[in-house]
Amino acid sequence: HRRPSRRSGAGLVAAGGLSSLASVVESQQFDRPMLEELFEVAREMERITEDGSECKILAGKVMGTLFYEPSTRTRLSFETAMCRLGGKVVSTENAREFSSVAKGETLEDTIRTLEQYVDVVVLRHFQAGSARIAADAASVPLISAGDGPGQHPTQALLDIYTIQKEIGRVDDTKVALVGDLANGRTARSLAYILSKFRNVKLYFVAPDVARINEDIKEHLTECGCEWEEVDNLQSVASEVDVLYQTRIQKERYGDRPEDYEKAQGKFIVDEDLMRLMKQDAVVMHPLPRVGEITPQVDADPRAAYFRQAKNGLYIRMALLATLLKGK
Ligand code: CP
């Protein structure tokens, strides 16, 4: 017996292109109509969350979260999303140590086992390409929560949702991606998805040891998306609508600590930089930060990074509802 919900759930789930979604492994899976559908569902999720409505559309469903790398936002927002939709969660954090992976089990076998218990798997893994391998092995929907330095597609979805909410458009924007662009999967996924919008100019601002990879530049050029690599953040700060700062990913510099030291602290968003920025621009960051945005910036209304993290809940609610109910 299910408790009656104040909303039936009908109307929460997109119909059309998005409903054919089987798994989420890379941001370029989403075209603009799919994004519009997803954002419509996310806005509804935001409304029901904000007004405290009870929603049980995923009652009876179970989500398994399998995290081989640390996470605060992605895992907890996915788990919160499932709870808010009436579903249940089983979870393995630090899967390398606390799952049978520690005994030598392969990723494919782990996925084939987990799918015996759950209706959807959310996977964070340390290897680029692992999300695709897992999705191919899975017979239930698999959502990548980040695969090493590869991609973080749900982050890109919430980032685009945030840009749309904060500045009212994604077309006709100038966006600076700043920081560890070589290892940062969020920047890679965001660049891919931004290439689907009109008249977007991307500035890549990275230390020499962390420059954006060629595959992204080639993709943008093929799409006709304008991009430029610059080494001076101040020179673009006054031009951009979105400044997307990222962390230098210390964990990816294991055998190159000297490169990490060179990169860390090179580009900082502080009050001086904020004075150069437009009044209607926003500063975003996938978080966590480790000094690349000073705490004094937090009080500036243009600092959107915690609102961005909150949008992750709505986007992940929308994705779960779509994947588990959309068909
Ligand atoms: N943005 C992001 O992926 O944060 P977590 O690593 O805390 O999940």
Image: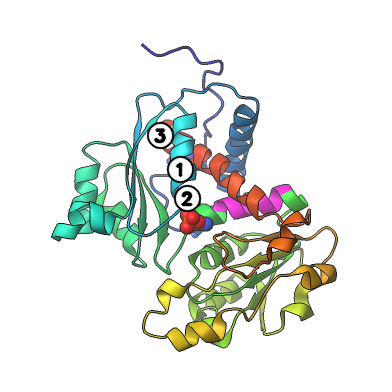
> Which stretch is magenta?
157-165
Q: Could you tell me what secondary structure mostly forms the magenta stretch?
A: helix
Q: Describe the element under mark 2 as helix, strand or loop.
A: helix
Residue 297: horizontal and vertical position, in percent? 74, 62
Say which residue appears at 76% left-offset and 62% top-offset: 172
Binning the other alpha carbons within 10 Å of mark 2 as few (below 14), some (14 to 19) or many (20 upward) gives many
Q: Quadrant of the C terminus?
A: top left
User: Label 2 CB, ligand 1: below 8 Å?
Assistant: yes
Which of the two discs, 3 and 1, labels the residue nearer the N terminus? 1
Q: Which residue is mark 2?
A: 74
Residue 44: horizontal and vertical position, in percent? 62, 32
Binning the other alpha carbons within 10 Å of mark 3 as few (below 14), some (14 to 19) or many (20 upward) gives many
Q: Which residue is mark 1?
A: 78
Q: Is residue 88 visible?
A: yes
Q: Which residue is mark 3?
A: 324
| Residue 146 image-quadrant placement | bottom left
Which of the two discs, 2 and 3, labels the residue nearer the N terminus? 2
**Horizontal arrangement in the rendering, residue 3 relative to residue 136 (left or right):** right
Residue 308: horizontal and vertical position, in percent? 63, 51
Say which residue appears at 43% left-offset and 44% top-offset: 21
Q: Is residue 164 magenta?
A: yes
Residue 306: horizontal and vertical position, in percent? 64, 51
Tag 2–tag 1 contact (CB < 8 Å): yes
Say which residue appears at 30% left-offset and 41% top-offset: 140
Tag 3–tag 1 contact (CB < 8 Å): no
Residue 281 to residue 40: above or below: below
